[in-house]
Structures are given as C-alpha cells and as structure tokens.
Image: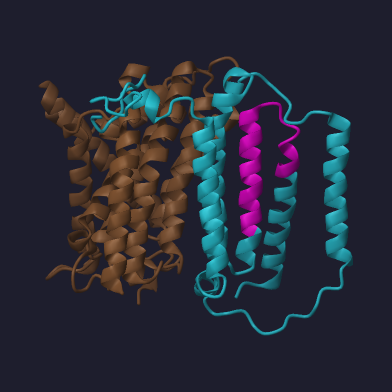
Chain colours: A cyan, B brown
C-alpha cells in the first residue's frame, strides 16, 4: 500500500482543487469555461473516491460527469438566450445573496464534518468493492433500483413528449397512414 | 492471470501508440494518393513530414479564441489515448491490469467528447463550433451501442479485468460469437477518432471543422490525437474480441501486434471505402438499429453465459 503521506497529499490536492475549481465556476465569465471548471471539480472529487479504494465508482463518476457536461453543452446552445453562449456572462444572478448562500452552506457542512463525533470503523472493507456494490444494487436493494429506473425512464419519456413540437400525427398524417414521414430533416432509416 | 509490466513500460506506451498512429496515417495517405493517381512512395512518409512541418509552422491566432480551452482539449485528446492504452494487454501483460480496466477504457474514450467540443468551441470560429457540435451529436449516437458492446464483453467474461476477458476467449473468440458487438465496437472506434466516414467534424465541407483555426503544434496534436485514438481502439479490439495474444507458433506479443495491424488496416480501409456518414442520418440509424441490435446481443450473451 502507498505511504500515508502520499495518500494525505493526494487527498489535499484533490480536495482543495475540487473546491477551488468549484468556486471558479462562478468566477469565470464564459459558460464554456464554467462547464469545464465544474467538470474538473467533479473529476478531482472522483480522485478522492479513488483514495477510498473505490476505483470503479470513481471512474464511473468521471465517465458520467463528462457525458453530462457534454450534453449540457448541447442544451446550452439550444436554450440559452445568449446565442452559443459565446458572449461573456455570469453564472449566477443576485450576486451577494447567491455567494453568501453557497459559501455559507459550504462552511456549515464543513463544520458539521469536523464537529460530528464519527463512529469508529466496524468490520473491514471487502476485497472486491465493485462486486459488493453490484450485489448491494442487484440483491437486497433490487426492488428500489428497479422502481427508480422505471420512474426515471418515465420522466425522460414524459419530458420528451411534453417538449416535442412534432408528434407522430404531424409526421404521419391524421390517420397515421402516410407512406413517408413529413420531416424537416430526413432521417437515416428510410422512412 | 496476467502480470503487470514493469513501470518502465510506461515509457513505451507513447512510442508504441505513436508508431501505430503514424502507420495508420501513412496507410491512409498511401490509399488516397493511389486513388488520386499521385506517387505512392512520397505518401508513405507524408504524416511524418506533415508533423515536422507543423512543428516549425508559425502559430496563428484568432482574436477572442479561448486558448486555454483549446489547449486543454488538445492535451485531453492525446492523454485520453495514452490513458486508454495503459490497460491494453500486450501478449497477456498490460501496464496496468486493473480490476476495472474495461470501465477505465470507456471513461478514457468518453473524455474525447469534451476534448473535441472544447477545441471546437474555443477556436472562436463558426466552422470550429459546427465541428465540435457535429462530434457531440455523433458521439451521442455511437456511444450507447459502444457501451452495450462492452457490456456484452464484460458479461461474457464475468469480469471488467482485461486479462479475464482474454482468458474467457480460450475456447471461442468473442468476435466470432458476438459479431454485432464487434461491429458496433469498430464503428465506435471510427466515430470516436472522427476517422474516415465519421470524419465529418473535421470534414472538408466545413473547411476542416475542428481544426480550421489550428496551426502549428496545435494542429499536429489534433491529428496525432485522432490517429492515436484509432490506434488504441484497434489495439483494444484484440483483447476484447480477437482472443488477445492467442495463436500458434508466434509469441503472444507478436500475435497481438499482427492482429492489431489487421484491425487497424480494416479500419483505415473501411474509412476509405465507406461513404461519409451524415450525423443526422447516423443518429436515427444508431438509435433505431444499433441500440436495439446491441441490446439484443447483450441479452443473447447473458442467456448463453447463464
């Protein structure tokens, strides 16, 4: 195992770096930089998860966050009032209240972490945390996970249905019997 | 059980990946020279000469370009290829035979998303921006089939460790009994390196897209990164689908090299043969054909394994 001081140094680099880049999200004046600062912050948080010997979770955090930020970039272009977000802009409104609320929340949570009487570790870490995680998700918590999965899927389908301005009647006619779909941009499967 | 290579092998990773990337570039240049009737011999060294030219080329900047994002994107692109290469077993030995190798590889190739997007965005050019968003649309299409292909492999091997994946193919190569997953994987490798038919993000009809405003070393890094990603994708196809270093007579490392070169050749050849893929068409094809097909493939694999 690596020496204690190496772990401690890595932890502080990840922890301070994560907080600093998280703060930078609100200091940079470009949405693109803010997105990337948030991504770096999450990646450094994943670094701290690696130090907990949870490599699988850490890599999944990085993977999901990259995809999430990329999808956010797509939406940024679609919905921002500032076309393409290329103009400098602030990531927050109501500056003083927003800043004091976020810094205040951080201080309260950090104080809680330092002040709480943490219990001593009971038992020992499993040899394969990835396997244990899979067993936990697919074993005793299976029903909960399946329910959450269905709820999330229903939410996605519902929001797409609500958001789309062209349904199947627009594409295939009132009786859904048009031989070809009427699409502004033709798709790739020959319909 | 595969062993870890000694730490010094870390130094060999950029050399091997770089050599494979140059080889892919040469092959592509030779094929286009032959198709255009230009002398083939000069095309063999074209990537190296182009690289040397870019090293000494004057940098060119667009006013208002976000250099920090562009440079970070370029470095991420090259680093992603290097990080993905760390878990590729060469003849049964990898730099890191991690217990989460497959997810590590996937995370490294997803890092390409933000890399390409940052380059396109930061260049402060509409063509660059179009290139960046073309890549994201392409990535949203190829990524799910790619992930389901990797899921099929992991399910069949019962492990995310690449040495276990190779060991699980001693009877039959995964490429043989999961052809849909193999095809989806190869498609995704072309997609993530924006190569050949999937090269629209750097396509000529958007004036070079992502690379339109890049000059000198920056431009070199973009194309080196694409070549390296293609090379690592080909190198990874061997342990994932082609039995790793398995084969008669030759030592495993040599078999790995032979198979990697064959896959690389197929990818470069497909890149020349296939028509340019239009992103909006591929998106529909990916979601209506490839996602269900790879899901069914994963289901078949799960049923067989159970």
Magenta highlight on residue B84: no
Q: Nearer the viewer, residue B216 or B125?
A: B125
> For the point 58% across and 29% down, which residue is it?
A76
Q: Quadrant of residue A27?
A: top right
> For the point 53% across and 69% down, which residue is it?
A142
> For the point 32% across and 17% down, which residue is it?
B205
Question: Taking B281 as reference, is B252 above or below it?
Answer: below
| Prevailing secondary structure class for the magenta stretch in the rendered image | helix
Q: Nearer the viewer, residue A178 or B98?
A: A178
Outermost residue toward the bottom in this view? A123
Which part of the image, by quadrant, shows the C terminus of chain A? top left
Answer yes or no: is residue B4 visible.
Answer: yes
Q: Nearer the viewer, residue B96 or A53?
A: A53
Q: How many marks?
A: 0
The span shown in magenta is: A21-47
Q: Quadrant of residue B303?
A: bottom left
Magenta highlight on residue A24: yes
Q: Quadrant of residue A23?
A: top right
Outermost residue toward the front in this view? A175
Answer yes or no: is residue B44 visible.
Answer: no
**Left or right: B109 in relation to A114:** left
Outermost residue toward the top in this view? B63
Which part of the image, by quadrant, shows the N terminus of chain A? bottom right
Q: Indicate the position of residue B17 as horizontal and vertical percent values.
A: 34, 49
Question: Taking B228 as reference, is B13 above or below it?
Answer: below
Q: Indicate the position of residue B285 as horizontal and vertical percent values.
A: 29, 37
């Amino acid at each position: 195992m690596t020496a204690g001081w190496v772990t401690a140094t890595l932890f502080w680099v990840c922890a301070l770096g994560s907080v600093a880049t998280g703060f930078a999200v609100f200091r940079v004046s470009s949405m693109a930089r803010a997105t990337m600062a948030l991504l770096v912050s999450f990646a450094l948080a994943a670094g701290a998860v690696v130090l907990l010997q949870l490599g699988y979770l850490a890599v999944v955090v990085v993977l999901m966050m990259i995809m999430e930020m990329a999808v956010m970039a797509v939406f940024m272009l679609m919905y921002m009032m500032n076309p393409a977000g290329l103009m400098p802009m602030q990531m927050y409104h109501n500056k003083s209240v927003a800043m004091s609320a976020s810094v205040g929340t951080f201080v309260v949570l950090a104080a809680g972490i330092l002040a709480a009487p943490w219990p001593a570790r009971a038992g020992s870490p499993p040899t394969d945390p990835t396997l244990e995680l899979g067993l936990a998700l697919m074993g005793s918590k299976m029903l909960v996970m399946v329910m959450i999965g269905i709820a999330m899927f229903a939410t996605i389908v519902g929001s797409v249905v609500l958001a789309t301005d062209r349904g199947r009647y627009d594409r295939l006619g009132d009786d859904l019997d048009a031989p070809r779909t009427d699409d502004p941009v033709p798709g790739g499967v020959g319909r | 059980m595969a062993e870890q290579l000694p730490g010094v092998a870390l130094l060999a990773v950029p050399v091997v990946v770089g050599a494979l990337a140059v080889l892919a570039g040469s092959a592509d240049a030779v094929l286009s020279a032959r198709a255009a009737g230009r002398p083939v011999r000069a095309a063999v060294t074209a990537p190296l000469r182009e690289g040397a030219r870019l090293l000494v080329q004057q940098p060119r900047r667009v006013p208002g370009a976000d250099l920090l994002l562009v440079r970070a994107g370029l470095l991420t692109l090259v680093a992603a290829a290097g990080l993905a290469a760390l878990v590729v077993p060469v003849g049964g030995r990898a730099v890191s035979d991690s217990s989460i190798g497959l997810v590590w590889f996937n995370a490294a190739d997803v890092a390409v998303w933000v890399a390409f997007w940052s380059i396109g965005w930061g260049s402060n050019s509409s063509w660059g921006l179009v290139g960046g968003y073309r890549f994201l649309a392409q990535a949203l299409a190829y990524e799910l089939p790619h992930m389901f292909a990797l899921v099929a492999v992991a399910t069949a091997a019962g492990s995310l460790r690449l040495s276990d994946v190779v060991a699980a193919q001693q009877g039959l190569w995964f490429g043989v009994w999961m052809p849909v997953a193999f095809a989806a994987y190869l498609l995704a490798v072309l997609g993530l390196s924006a190569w050949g038919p999937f090269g629209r993000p750097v396509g000529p009809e958007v004036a070079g897209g992502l690379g339109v405003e890049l000059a000198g070393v920056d431009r070199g890094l973009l194309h080196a990164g694409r070549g390296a990603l293609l090379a690592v994708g080909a190198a990874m196809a061997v342990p994932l689908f082609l039995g790793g270093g398995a084969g008669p007579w030759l030592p495993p490392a040599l078999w790995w090299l032979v198979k990697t070169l064959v896959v690389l050749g197929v990818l470069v050849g497909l890149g020349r043969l296939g028509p340019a893929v239009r992103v909006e068409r591929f998106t529909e094809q990916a979601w209506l054909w490839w996602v269900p097909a790879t899901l069914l493939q994963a289901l078949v694999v799960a049923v067989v394994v159970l």
